[in-house]
Amino acid sequence: MTILNKIITEKKKEVAQLLNQTFDQVTISKNAKSFHQIMKEKSTMGVIAEIKRASPSKGMINANVDPVKQAKIYAKNGASAISVLTDTPFFKGTMDDLRAVREIVDIPILCKDFIIDKIQIDRAKAAGANIILLIAAALTDADLKKLYEYALENDLEVLCEVHNKEEMERVLNLGAIIIGINNRDLKTFHVDLETTTRLSSMVTDPEIILISESGIQTKEDVETVAKAGAKAILVGETLMRTSDVAKTINNLQIPLSNKVGL
């Protein structure tokens, strides 16, 4: 059984417990710009800065992180969005983390979780998320379409995540306009930045915001994925481990010269 299979098995148990629950709604500013709008206006690499205590591949990364303090630094130093891991069994995150971050930032928040049911989308929106993650590898075409449309109906943006050509074709057929290329294989957790280079050529619509996820540590890594066409990066572990969060996040925001159609 792959790590992804194990995670989805746990998610099914979680969903069963969530069904028929209602969630207290956090207030979200109606005037705030969407992530897509923010990215269309940027001339530098967008950074989705992540709050991530642990992962199945790396174990504990930063057990003592204060989500509020971390989020304030991210927002102050130009993050285009903040990703909050809300999975507990494998990543040691919680919905309370997301709620706490929502209270102190106005920029978009991505609920980073393994979503397989509408009830998880309801919970994410109630907690203050603006964006949800749908992982192509974890969903059938029918479920991907159903959850994608449900999120849009609820005024949420959707980051559709892919790792190979077949998954990229699926989300392009879906009409996704925010696509994340995960350089990490969720079945083996092996990381290869060339994944972004290999798949980015399939994206020809200038309206699509292409995001490179996982394995980005240095300015050189950012330059590699920028050359491939990425307009944003999702960075977790690097920001969780650095001794100078502000400096690190600023170093990643390189100028973009390939703003074709933007």
Image: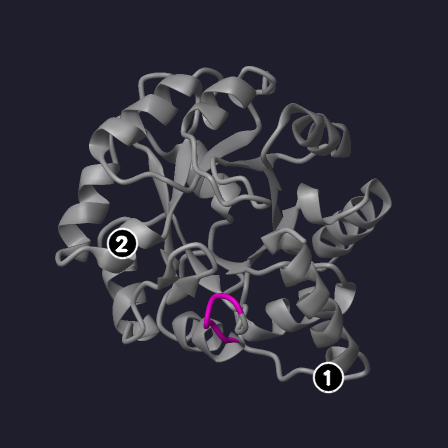
Q: Of 194 and 159, which appears nearest the observer?
A: 194
Residue 92 magenta: yes
Say the numbered circle drawn on residue 239. Answer: 2
On screen, residue 113 versus residue 51, left or right, reads: right
Question: Could you tell whether 108 is left or right of 4 in the image?
Answer: left
Q: Which residues are magenta?
A: 90-94
- Indicate whether residue 246 is drawn in magenta: no
In percent of the image, x 43 and y 42: which residue is there? 38
Relative to 109, residue 157 above or below: above
Quarter of the rendering occupied by the N terminus: bottom right
For marks 2 and 1 on the same chain, the one whose residue lies earlier in the sequence: 1
Residue under the image location 47 percent in, 50 percent down: 33
Q: Position of residue 6 (x, y in %)?
A: 65, 61
Circle 1: residue type: Thr
Residue at the image position 48 percent from the left and 76 percent from the top: 99
Seen in the picture, residue 9 relative to 44 is either above or below; the reply is: below
The tag on residue 22 is 1
Determine the residue positioned at 71% across, 27% down.
Answer: 166
Where residue 144 sits: x, y (%)?
77, 46
Q: Amino acid at mark 2?
A: Leu
